[in-house]
Image (cartoon, rainbow, N blue to C red):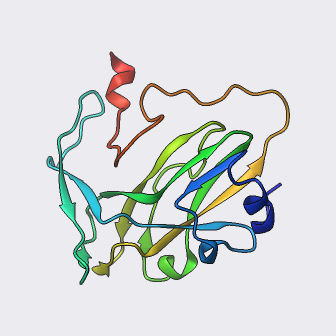
Amino acid sequence: MILSGKEIEKNLGEEIIITPFVKEQLNPNSYNLRLHNELLIYNEHTLDMKKENKTSKIRIPEDGLILLPGKLYLGRTIEYTETKGYIPFIEGRSSVGRLGLSIHISSPYGNVGFKGYWTLEISCLQPIRIYPEINICQIYYQTIKGEFDSYSSFKYQNNKDIQSSKLFKEFE
């Protein structure tokens, strides 16, 4: 089951950590997460799964940045989250999607025990101007049934910034 907004708020500081928490971002069954003011772009046109692909950081100015179709932008949330007994997952906001902007390409599910910022895989269908601190996506929490092991990835746990793919570490 998905937690209600009231249940999310009730579990803050215990099973769920959202920092900073802004009450106005709480929805009936989710919480809005905002876009940080930095993005990563890959330097190479052709990416290689077996190596660390080099990236460059770009800043989203207050007056916005135009994203172009056919390019992948990696962003992150302003909010740091931790979950101890729930499965977190993110989805783009429908208002954002209706502008042709996608915030994730892969699975929206996180793992029980995830601690960090959410890396967003941003792409667009047509040129679009984006802005820092916009409510870009929503985090939901689902209950989990049965015993579980908490997430402890050597690749992404406790991240402090935007995370490019670390798939190459699986080939080492």
Tag count: 0
For the C terminus, the image quarter is: top left
Horizontal and vertical percent position of residue 51? 24, 29
Image quarter of residue 50: top left
Residue at x-position 48% and y-position 34%: 157
Residue at x-position 27% and y-position 59%: 39
Question: Relative to 165, is 169 above or below?
Answer: above
Question: Relative to 76, is 170 above or below?
Answer: above
Residue at far top of view: 172
For the N terminus, the image quarter is: bottom right
Image quarter of residue 93: bottom right
Q: Is residue 110 left or right of residue 99?
A: right
Horizontal and vertical percent position of residue 79? 49, 58
Q: Is residue 4 left or right of residue 61?
A: right
Q: Is residue 120 left or right of residue 115?
A: left
Q: Nearer the viewer, residue 100 or 26?
A: 26
Horizontal and vertical percent position of residue 95? 53, 82
Residue at x-position 57% and y-position 78%: 94
Horizontal and vertical percent position of residue 108? 57, 52
Q: Nearer the viewer, residue 6 or 43?
A: 6
Q: Is residue 44 left or right of residue 91?
A: left
Question: Relative to 150, is 35 above or below?
Answer: below
